[in-house]
Amino acid sequence: MKILNLAKKDIRDVVLEFNSDIEKGLDSSIAEKRLSVNGGNILPDRDLKWWKIFLKQFRSPFIYLLLVASFLSFVFRQEVEGAMIFLFIIINTVLGFFQEYRSENTVKLLKKFIKIKTKVIRDGIEQEVDSENLVLGDIVVLETGDKISADLRILEASDLNIDESILTGESILVSKQAEIVRKEDIDCFSASNLCFSGTVVFSGRARAIVIAVGKDTFLGTVTKLTSQVKRVSDFEKGIGKFSSFILKLVLITLIFVFVFNAVFKDGLDFLQLTIFSIALAISVIPEALPLVMTFSFSKGAMNLAKKNVVVKRLSSVEDLGNIDILCSDKTGTLTENKLTILDFYESLFPAKDILLYANLAVARLSEKREPFDIALFDKLDQSDKNNLTKFEFIVDTPFDPRRQRNNVLLRGERSLEFVVRGAPEVLFDLCSNLKIKDLEDIRKWILDQGLLGRRVLAVAKKEIKEMALDDLKNNLIGLENGLEFLGLISFADPVKESVNQAVLSARDLNVGIKIITGDSPEVAGSVASQIGLISSSDKVFLGKDFINLSKEEKKKVLNEYHVFARVLPEQKFDIIKSLQENFNVGYLGDGINDAPALKIAGVSLVVQNASDIARETADIVLLEGDLNVIIEGIKEGRRIFANSSKYIKATLASNFGNFYAVAVASLLVNFLPMLPLQILLLNLLSDFPMIAIATDNVDKEELLSPKKYKVNDIIIIAIILGIVSSVFDFVYFAMFYKISPAVLQTNWFIGSIITELAFLFSIRTKKSIFKGYRPSFLVTTLSLFAVIITVVIPFTAWGQNLFKFIAPSGKHLLMIFGVAIIYLICSEIVKLMYYKNKDNKLVITR
């Protein structure tokens, strides 16, 4: 970022560069001219047209298939089939439209952070202006509670502390001052004289100059990354490949069948042949897939809702089940985002005294307190809180990052008390009661705390004899000698109770965990070590080092390291993008700095207290702090994947088997082996119970590892079992084609539906049909109902008049069911042999 170079320049040079004046600010005329030339302090707005998003939902090969199928069904007066297919399309389109329209509004939320008033100096007068009217060179006045609306270079500051957690993820306040930053390698973490848009002034006062506005600010770069990301979920990728395959295969086969019949068969009704070909094409398209997926996603979302999880993008439930790696921010996600006192060094004084005086070092208890002060106050019991009231505040010296300490003078019951609080190494030289052995013990304790990722605060005091208060007030810093060292307090942002179990459960499900945080490497390493993610807390990689690596080096680092610290938003984005080259990636975050990573990730999750932009970008929101619900979500996603795969395999194998059998049979006889209306009815009755597969039970083995839509694997098993299906279709053909066209058409219709439903019970488990988890009640019930309807229809008047069936004989029905049983046995044998062979190959590969 160019603005980082301004941190290394002298104040006068920066002001000169922007043609401004420290005391008078800009002239109003110059400010107006800059506003008209360069534009306002606003984030770029995109022309968001709802109808464009709506039309975009139709850009899918699978939707093209369904639209053509629906249109042709209406053309040839198959209104029921056409209406059902169109209903499936509408459900899919409406869901997709609302999901994408919501996500595209993400950028608008970012603009909330700069729609505020800002105090500036123009024409030598302090005045308020709309933040969107800020221009480069404006002199800004900052006070406690102000939201910073542009990137600033500090000109002068007094006790200035900034809350940057919304950008960096760190819960610790950042002290700012006007001095030049001397470091050569500088980033937003070390730019101590810069303030960034979107952050908040926690305490103090400052004067600063605007050095970047709108899209050029740090927040603007986050906005740009977020708006540019176009995420295609793993589910969408898999279905896209699957749809393209079906489209190509069906078109090629139909052209062959139509041409062969037209060329080699005389006297065939071309209209009838056209209708037959279209009906055949429709029969192989799994038009109920969108409905099956919608039922599956809704069922998964409702199950998670019972665990206080909000699923905003329905298909994200399945995407969650397919992730190989879950990346997470640290603060607020893995940790509580609240400093807590964890330990005391109390060899010299008891912890109770150390805690009391550490609280007394807060200037005024009624004032807004920083996280350290809140943690200290929360640790007090009621009697200690009562003791605080026995001291009267007189005067203090605020914390100064250069001196690394603050002090306060108070009146106690018997004397004046002078309390100093700050960095341990600074206070050592100011204390008179520390011996060499004490210092050795203290330094070892500090080192141990540092290795645990904890921050340490030292406390010292001394009694002051009564003297003129004016002299004391004017010489507080001069009193910082001969102090009595009281002890040390260590702080940390504690790990959430549910995290350790969640990490263990993730490993059991073969999901890798990586921490990507803006926090320091010491703190990030400590948290990772505590949750068992790494064995050594120094096994941490820095974001600035990752961004400069080659593609191969990045791949190596991503394989070796599980913790990345001091990571900026664009670096998080790069890490996630690099991981996605080889893995399905989920991301758990909570801040503005997480927004780009959340949007590019295959599935994005946030906790309840996340920033607005993070919540809006996310697919899934956890309303409670228990991260084990993520594990339940992964299992739920894998159940959905398993059931959707069952449907795809079942329909492909059955439909392709029947498709090719009927197509080939049409070449062998001078009549159509099955009428167009019969084909459509067959498709409808066989799909009816298959929709219930969304409710089916899943074998435990299906939950143990991430799954992907491997089109080749699905095609192979569908072709193998489809061949088995075709063989038995030809058995039906051979048994009945010589009797009469009506007998063949009726009996083949009944046999096709019964074998398809029998096959569903086989393909739903990779185990034997008798060893797999039992099917759900709804799958069993609807399948039996479909079988009954199938057998009854040919006996009804409307079945015979409308569909041209004839009543089958009892002998023929026994033959049909007998062949179906043999078919089920053969399908089981072939299925078990296929999966056994596949598992053996996997073992050899590993």
Image (cartoon, rainbow, N blue to C red):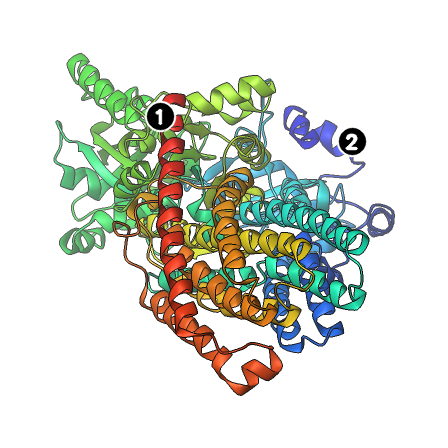
Q: CA distance from mark 2 to mark 1?
A: 67 Å
Report the amino acid beneath label 1. Val
**SS type, badge 1:** helix
Residue 28: image location, x then y, percent: 82, 52
Please indicate whether residue 610 sits to the left or right of residue 455 in the image.
right
The residue indicated by pointer 2 is: 17
The residue furthest front is: 738
| Mark sitting earlier along the chain (2/1) | 2
The answer to whether any part of residue 485 appears in the image is yes
Q: Nearer the viewer, residue 140 or 640?
A: 640
Local packing at callout 1 (Cα closer than 10 Å; few below 14, some 14-19, many 20+) is few
Q: Residue 799: name its quadrant.
A: bottom right
Coordinates of residue 121 in the picture (x, y in percent): 71, 49
Label pair 2/1, CB-CB below 8 angstroms: no
Residue 65's x, y, as percent?
68, 58
State left or right for residue 537 relative to residue 438. Answer: right
How many numbered badges does the structure rendering display? 2
Q: How would you rate the neighbour count of disc 2 (Cα within 10 Å): few for under 14, some for 14-19, many for 20 or more?
A: few
Residue at left 42%, top 23%?
A: 561
Residue at 31 percent across and 45 percent down: it is: 767
Question: Is 216 or 649 nearer to us in this picture?
Answer: 649
Residue picked out by circle 1: 843
Among the 4 quarters of the image, the one containing residue 245: top right
Q: List x then y, in percent, for residue 453.
A: 32, 29
On residue 114, the disc is: none
Q: Quadrant of the C terminus?
A: top left
Check disc 2 and give the amino acid type: Glu
Q: Residue at x 74, y 34 (%)?
A: 15
Q: Secondary structure at mark 2?
A: helix
Q: Residue furthest bottom?
A: 797
